[in-house]
Image: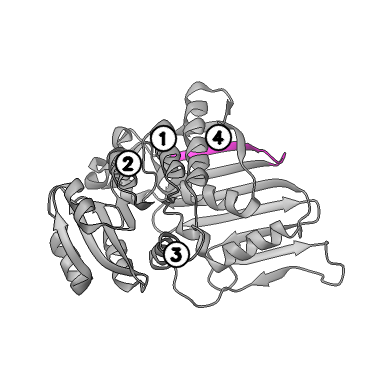
Amino acid sequence: MPIPVAILTHAGGPHLDAYFAALAASTEVGEVSVWDASGRTFAAAQKTLGPKLKLTGKDISTVLREAKPKLALVTMEAVLAPPAIDAALEQGCHVLAEKPACVRASDFEPLVRKAEGKHLHLMLAFANRLRPEAREAQRLVREGRLGKLYGMEIHLVADQTRLKSEGYRKSWMGQKARGGGGHLTWLGIHWLDLALFISGAEVEAVAGFSGNVGGQPMDVEDSNAAALRFTNGMFGTMTSGYYLDRGYHQHIKVWGEQGWLELNHQPEVSLKWYSTAEPKVSGIQTYTPPNEPSGYTPWVHACARAAAGLQDPPATGREGMRVLDTIYAFYEAAKSGQTKSVKRR
């Protein structure tokens, strides 16, 4: 039976149009209610959600009390997200939150503990986990096709062009106090999570450099070069920055004692690997994903199913906490010039 959902947001909420469309399309989502203190998103909600829209309101407690949602979708600038997440959890809602959902890892930790104490799901929007090639890469690693893991390279580079827009620089994504960071908290976070998802490892120590190499007038970083040590003994590097005029360069590479794999975003071959674990199979193997929906619609669908008790959550609050702990420990390491340990929770 479709579940009631509340979306907690504001004007300019990140990926708001995509979330409205995903809620409208998901068969697991029934009535949708919208909280927005400004009221500026209500017209867009009505246009996209149509008959699914139950109520709108400017008071969060009223919306949560009257709508009685099973799932709250929180898409807000990072500094504003924790109180909204807390209110939803207090009301007994499972939560899907747009990342990073905080400007300090310490602001997210009590939310994870509250969710666990209430047996509720708290899921950050790590939609890349549902990509078929990502799940296949995870299967290869978990089944031992690469043997003991030795090293990893994480690479996500986007465009510098957006940073030249005054509107972007004045948005929450261009201000550290409102967004927590720059490229790493907004885009790099996706591939860092994916690296942990595929490898099954956690980061235990970080070092590196973070700064504004492009020189645009903003106080968040456009460039990160990180060194990572993982709990399974593996070493890794991560490049996370705004360098291009347009588009993305992105891949994850993993090397082990019995082979390697590369995950990328090429439509023809998005995953390739080499393994000596199976003597009867030689050479480089490839995987072409099936043509199926991607992005936020399947992620919202999976989170709604988890809230309805039909499947496990596609990401847990503790998994989100590990990624945030790594990112904010890295920022501290880059600022101090010293290696920093990542909290184990």
Left or right, 51 with reference to 131:
left
**Front-most of residues 5 and 77:** 5
x 32%, y 44%: residue: 85
Check contact, mark 2 vs mark 3: CB within 8 A.
no
* Picture disc at residue 124: none
Inter-mark Cα distance, 2 to 3: 22 Å
Q: What is the x, y in percent for residue 238?
A: 56, 43
- Crowding near the residue tagged with mark 4, few <14, some 14–19, many ≥20 C-alpha atoms within 10 Å: few
Q: Amino acid at mark 3?
A: Ala
In the rendered structure, which disc, 4 or 3, sits on the residue that comes first in sequence? 3
Q: Which residue is mark 3?
A: 302
Q: Amino acid at mark 2?
A: Asp
Q: Which residue is mark 2?
A: 86
Look at the image and tell me in which quarter the N terminus lies: bottom left
- Crowding near the residue tagged with mark 3, few <14, some 14–19, many ≥20 C-alpha atoms within 10 Å: many
Inter-mark Cα distance, 4 to 3: 26 Å
In the rendered structure, which disc, 1 or 3, sits on the residue that comes first in sequence? 1
Q: What is the x, y in percent for residue 35?
A: 19, 53
Dot 4: what SS?
loop
- Crowding near the residue tagged with mark 2, few <14, some 14–19, many ≥20 C-alpha atoms within 10 Å: some
Q: Which residues are magenta?
A: 222-234
Check contact, mark 4 vs mark 3: CB within 8 A.
no
Inter-mark Cα distance, 1 to 3: 24 Å
In the rendered structure, which disc, 2 or 1, sits on the residue that comes first in sequence? 2
Q: Which residue is mark 1?
A: 110
In the rendered structure, which disc, 2 or 3, sits on the residue that comes first in sequence? 2
x 53%, y 49%: residue: 193
Dot 2: what SS?
helix
